[in-house]
Image (cartoon, grey):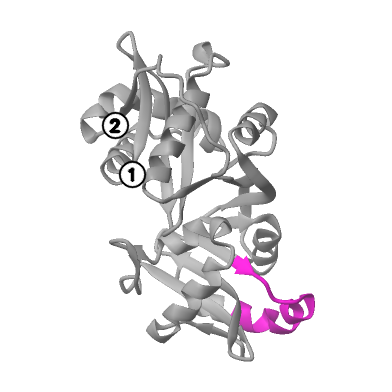
Amino acid sequence: MPWTISDKNDLIDIIKFLQVYEWKNIQALSEYLSEGNYKQPLRGSVLTIIYRDNGVITSLIVITAKGLLYPIIRMTSQEKISSKNELIRILASIKFNTHGIIGLKDDVDYLDSIIFKRIRGINNYILLHRDNNIKLIIDNTHNILKASPRDLNRLLPLEIEYQKEEVLLNPKELNKKATMLNFKKKLQTDDVYYIYENNIAISKCGTTYKSKKYTLIGGVFTWKSRRNLGYSTNLLKYMINEEEKKGLTSALFVKSSNSVALHLYKKLGFIDPVDYKINYYYN
């Protein structure tokens, strides 16, 4: 039975497997990163199912306490077929609610085919990582600030519009209190940068997940009335450079339909586009 629930003895092999294509696995690796080192997650916070071929991990699924699943599937087509029933059995034995599956499109589609859950919505993205050999020149005319929890009220209107336009399947379902609490926590734990002019926060972006070598950028948003004026471009350049100073290479994903943003990211040195996907499920 190659599919098994991992334990602390599998930690080194799990990290080695995820680091092979680290920029594609930042979210999964972030679940193991604590105080700058990879460690066994706290009991009940993360569960990982692994598939071994002759003792070597070739696929795994990271399951978080929030019901997010990160599949990284590198087994052969025949192995997918022969091990399918065993994976179904293991998943059925675990008590968790599946809220979303996040990962490379083929991996998400494979896992979706065996969890027997009704899809609430799908977002298709392009995932890219940056070539740090491409140097960026920052326009110093913008007032770029690093956010702190004290900036919550200043930035919350931007975050609300970002959630409605880029994240939520149905903008009418926005919960302002939950959005405020989540963003308040983000300002405490993540790096968030913004442009502030004439007493208005115009543009923002921030980190979402980190591994030892990569940072995943997210939350890039500018007021509609200020778009195509270079705000997001300059802000991203600044943030990318700040992350590079820490030894981190940037990665991000963008909606497949957003050709303007995709063109911008490629100009900023983001390369190797791959299809990325998030499936949302009914509880």
Q: Quadrant of residue 256?
A: top right
Q: Main secondary structure of the magenta part?
A: helix
Look at 36% across and 31% down and name the residue there.
193
Is the Cβ of the residue at disc 1 closer than 8 Å to that at disc 2?
A: no
Against 98, residue 8 (above or below) is below
Which is nearer the N-term, disc 1 or disc 2?
2
Look at 61% across and 52% down and name the residue there.
279
Against 215, residue 52 (above or below) is below
Residue marked by disc 1: 190
- Residue 151 % position (x, y): 25, 27
Residue 105 visible in the displayed image: yes
Secondary structure beneath dot 2 equals loop
Q: Which residues are magenta?
A: 72-89
Residue marked by disc 2: 147
Q: Quadrant of residue 92?
A: bottom right
Q: Type of residue at label 2?
A: Ala
Q: Type of residue at label 1?
A: Asp
